Image (cartoon, rainbow, N blue to C red):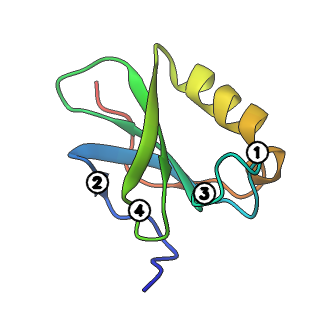
Amino acid sequence: MEHTVAPDTIDGAGVILSARVASLPAAEPCVTGIAICQYSNEAGFYLFSCDAEWETIWDSWHETLESAVSNAELQCTSIKATWRRHAPMMS
């Protein structure tokens, strides 16, 4: 069962932004969602690439939210207009 909207947390990190991905390069055929998350005890941000159930396939750490967004949009240009905002950033 595919979850269209990302949950509030992924791997224990709070979801800040998420987007469904229509297509990524052939090397990542099972990635169907991208989420930018933040753990409550960390200042940085994680970019999670997820499957249809929002289970993490791989992740990358970014010092800023802008860096995580930029990296996601480089991977998949179609998500730029489809970001869904979730929780505010943690301080």
Q: Check contact, mark 3 vs mark 4: CB within 8 A.
A: no
**Disc on the earlier residue, 2 or 4:** 2
Q: Secondary structure at mark 1?
A: loop
Residue of label 1: 76
Give the Cα separation between the discs numbered 3 and 4.
11 Å
Q: Quick one: quadrant of the N terminus? A: bottom left
Nearer the observer, 85 or 46:
46
Rendered location of residue 12, percent (x, y): 20, 46
Question: Real-space Cα distance between discs 2 and 1?
Answer: 22 Å
The alpha-carbon separation of the residues under discs 2 and 4 comes to 10 Å
Residue at 60 percent of width and 57 percent of height: 19
| Sooner in the amino-acid sequence: mark 4 or mark 1 | 4
Tell me how far mark 3 sits from mark 2, CA to CA.
14 Å
Residue displayed at 57% across by 60% down: 30
Which three-letter amino acid code belongs to the residue tagged 4? Trp
Q: Position of residue 80 (x, y in %)?
A: 77, 47
Q: Nearer the viewer, residue 37 or 33?
A: 33
Q: Residues within 10 Å of mark 4 (few under 14, many from 20)?
A: many
Residue under numbered circle 4: 54
Give the residue pinned by disc 2: 9
Residue 85 on image: x %, y %: 52, 53
Q: Which mark is residue 19?
A: 3
Regarding mark 3 in the picture, which secondary structure is present there? strand
